[in-house]
Amino acid sequence: MTATILPTALACAALTVIAGTGAAQTASAPAKPAYAYATNGVLDELKSRPGGAKWKLLLDASNLGGKELEAAEVTLPAGTATPSHTHGAVEVIYVLSGLYEHEVNGKRYRLTPGMIGIVRPGDKVRHLAPTAAGAKLLVLWAPAGEAARAFAHSKGVTPPPVPEVQP
């Protein structure tokens, strides 16, 4: 049940963010943004990060056509612990599989598949995958801007485009 409800809920959340920022843009009537209708993502990292974490940038301005939202798929191996840091955007973390913990402003939370964690701008956060299990996450940032920080030193590749299916 979660597998069907989640994509719909995330799509609705993304559209709400986009519609909210788009309303302000309507008054100035900017040109319609160009975007990719279907992609395999924007950037796949060739090498995993220290500790073995793997990141795939799924959505940014290059395929969304605007700066309202960014998304990444993150795989954290068991035992991963990031240093405390802050974000300049809302960070929404959806646990796809495994066991994930995050410490937000000194309070630690354990999330399992189907659960969502939220980190607000200015919150101090640490991301953890306990030694018992790793985790696979979908991470959303709104508004955009966090992906540039997260992928600043990435040595990744652009995934191949998704071909259009002819009827």
Image (cartoon, rainbow, N blue to C red):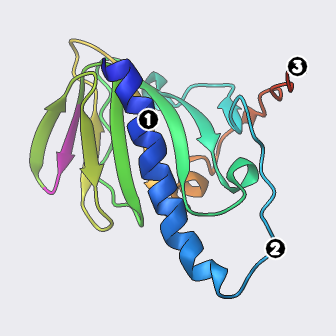
Residue 34 falls in image quadrant = bottom right
Quick one: label 3 or label 1, which is nearer the N terminus?
1
**Residue 57 screen position, x and y as percent:** 61, 39
The quarter of the image holding the C terminus is top right
For the residue pair 5 and 73, the one nearer the viewer reads as 5
User: Mark 3 and mark 1: span between their CA atoms?
Assistant: 25 Å
**Residue 82 screen position, x and y as percent:** 33, 40
User: Mark 3 and mark 2: span between their CA atoms?
Assistant: 30 Å
Q: Nearer the viewer, mark 3 or mark 2?
A: 3
Whether residue 123 appears in magenta in the rendering, the answer is no
User: Mark 2 and mark 1: span between their CA atoms?
Assistant: 28 Å
For the residue pair 43 and 36, the one nearer the viewer reads as 36
- 97 lies above or below 141: above
**In the image, what residue occupies the spot 69% across and 25% down?**
46
Q: Nearer the viewer, mark 3 or mark 1?
A: 3
Task: Please name the residue that numbered disc 1 is placed on.
Answer: 8
Q: Amino acid at mark 2?
A: Ala
* Residue at the extreme bottom: 28
The answer to whether residue 156 is left or right of residue 113 is: right
Q: Amino acid at mark 3?
A: Pro
Q: Which mark is residue 167?
A: 3
Name the chief secondary structure element in magenta. strand
Whether residue 102 appears in magenta in the rendering, the answer is yes
What span is colored magenta in the figure?
101-105
Q: Secondary structure at mark 1?
A: helix
Q: Secondary structure at mark 2?
A: loop
Task: Please name the residue that numbered disc 2 is placed on.
Answer: 31
Crowd tier of the residue under label 1, counting other residues whose Cα lies within 10 Å: few below 14, some 14–19, many 20 or above: few
The quarter of the image holding the N terminus is top left
The answer to whether residue 127 is left or right of residue 39 is: left
Quick one: label 3 or label 2, which is nearer the N terminus?
2
